[in-house]
Amino acid sequence: MGPPTTDFQNADAVVNLLEEAATHCRNEKYRDHSVVRLPARGRLIATGDLHDNPVHFGKILEYARLDRSEHNHVYFHELIHGENLINGMDFSHRMLLRIAELKCRYPDQVHPILANHELSQLSGAGVTKGAGDSVEMFNQAVDWTFGDDAEHVSTSLNNFMRSWPIAIMTESGIMASHSLPAERSMPLFDPSIVNRDLAEDDLNPRTGSAYLMLWGRGHSDEHLKNLASIFGVTAFLLGHEHAHTGSKLVGKRALVLNSDHERGVILPINLTEEPDPEAWIWSAVPLGALPD
């Protein structure tokens, strides 16, 4: 993975990095409004929730081999709000800076996508992993690191996250997103969110379409079938839910991945092949088996 090339304690350098990365997110060649659409060529490394796990982050990058081919891709989500607190503060903004550096180095191959914890950080709505308000602990770490420049850095961090797509969609029929709207949320959900730019209302807690999509749980196979028809795909790659063994099937059309805990996994996807969630579960690669 290598050390950062940016001074992560220099506010001006950090702001410049985040602004450049946000521009790459909005302007990458595969971006189509609020989603990234990948052609049937090359390889995609699918990941689950990461929650500021730097060891697994490094392993994923080594496995992705982004320098080997411009057609090797990787996506990341649920990057922040980990359990590695320092004096009660969450320094996972540094994970966002590592992603920003990667986006600048591989602008059309590295794809951060929105997840519920990034959305909570953007909106300021409290969220917890059991140790307190993760949003507040994140803000405290930014304040401690950057002092009088913290507000400027926070604005740039938010602008970077705001530039992310909500999903990866492939020509082969895969939709990779942090989650999907629950069935009970469908009357409020606007499916056209994948065909247009995100609006501010989409981020609103409990009513916005992005919020409903990123917080959904408990998907039945019938609901997934309906969503597949709505979105024009055949299979889903998700996170958000806990998978004790790192991956789990949801019905016949979706696979949940976790990449944060000791049994976390990633999934290499051949973008030229038809998606097969029931086969994917046997192709998942345990991160614990990869070299540090």
Image (spheres, rainbow, N blue to C red):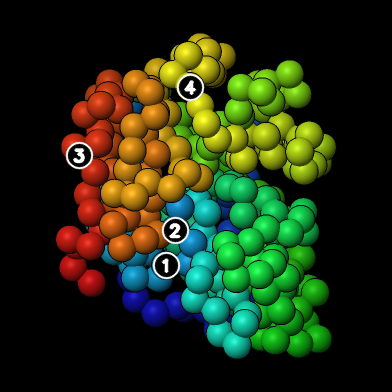
- Residue tagged 4: 220
- Residue tagged 2: 50
Q: Nearer the viewer, mark 2 or mark 4?
A: 4
Q: Nearer the viewer, residue 134 or 118?
A: 134
Q: Is residue 1 above or below residue 150?
A: above
- Residue tagged 3: 283
Please report whichever mark, 3 or 4, sits nearer to the chain's N-terminal start: 4
- Residue tagged 1: 53
At x 39%, y 39%, the residue is: 256
Please report whichever mark, 1 or 4, sits nearer to the chain's N-terminal start: 1
At x 38%, y 23%, the residue is: 251
Q: Residue 60's x, y, as percent?
A: 31, 58
Distance CA(mark 1)–CA(mark 2): 6 Å
User: Residue type at mark 2?
Assistant: Leu
- Labels 1 and 4 touching (C-beta < 8 A): no
Please tell me whether mark 3 sits on a helix, a strand or a loop.
Answer: helix
- Labels 2 and 4 touching (C-beta < 8 A): no
